[in-house]
Amino acid sequence: MARIVKKPDVRREEIIKAAGELFHAKEYDKATMQDLMKELNIAKGTIYHYFSSKEDLLEAVVEGLIDEELKKKEKLHADCRRKNLDALQTIRLLATADQMAKENEQILEMLHQPGNIIMHARQLGRYLTKLAPIYGAVIEEGCARGILKTDHPLECAEFLLAGIQFLTDVGFYPWSKEEIARRMAAFPSLLEDLLSAPAGSFNFLVE
């Protein structure tokens, strides 16, 4: 049988996709690079040409999840524009439609391992860099319509995402349930003040 030669970017994406499926089906700690080689029917040298370790591969899988989430958010934002929804309606839909953590809990939980703290921080930064501009654009649209008011729409979006992600993530620090509950209860009014939004605009965050 003739040997199939694939372009490097195609082969890399194939490995990442297969790894994501493997990590879903099997606990990350129990999955091995050998499992992946067997699944893809590729040689050891091939997989290690693209990824130096299982940790390196995990990071690529998480990056792929973030890129998928970005595409979903871009499509949802475009749908909201077509329906002429206002900024507050759009923010609510964007925030409540975020299923990345729920759908990939087993994979993302590995970022909470002590040895992966740097990877965890790096991926949070990537998440903010990718998704904050969408929220920033929505906030800017809200300001243009007079619903919201700020001179820094993108920075407000970054503050919103970073605050919620970091201050409620026990993977970064072992926050108690009381500390998380206290912050979540305060987020709606803090965001209303930050964006000069009508009272109750962000109550959905704690509902």
Image: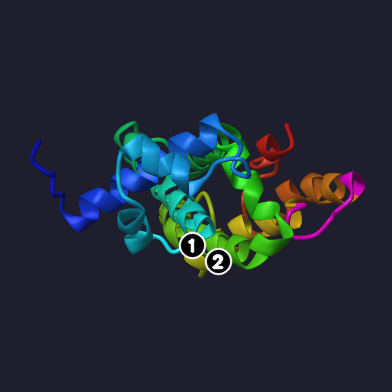
Q: What secondary structure predominates along the stretch shown in magenta?
A: loop
Location of the N terminus by quadrant is top left
Give above or below for 89 relative to 58: above
- In the displayed image of the protein, which residue is found farthest to the left? 2
Q: Residue at x 38, y 38 (%)?
A: 38
Q: Nearer the viewer, mark 2 or mark 1?
A: 2
Location of the C terminus by quadrant is top right
- Determine whether, in the image, residue 177 is placed left or right of residue 17: right
Q: SS for tag 1?
A: helix
Q: Quick one: 74 or 185, which is closer to the camera?
A: 74
Residue 41, image quadrant: top left
| Circle 2/circle 1 CB separation < 8 Å | yes
Q: Quick one: 43 or 52, which is closer to the camera?
A: 43
Describe the colour scheme in one phrase. rainbow
According to the picture, the residue beneath numbered tag 1 turns out to be 126
**Residue 123 position in % (x across, y down):** 54, 60
- In the displayed image of the protein, which residue is found farthest to the front? 1
Magenta part of the protein: which range?
170-178
Please state which amino acid type lies under the numbered disc 2: Arg
Q: Residue at x 13, y 49 (%)?
A: 5
**Residue 154 position in % (x across, y down):** 48, 64
Q: SS for tag 2?
A: helix
According to the picture, the residue beneath numbered tag 2 turns out to be 122
Q: CA distance from mark 2 to mark 1?
A: 6 Å
Give above or below for 53 relative to 78: below
Give above or below for 18 relative to 10: above
Please state which amino acid type lies under the numbered disc 1: Arg
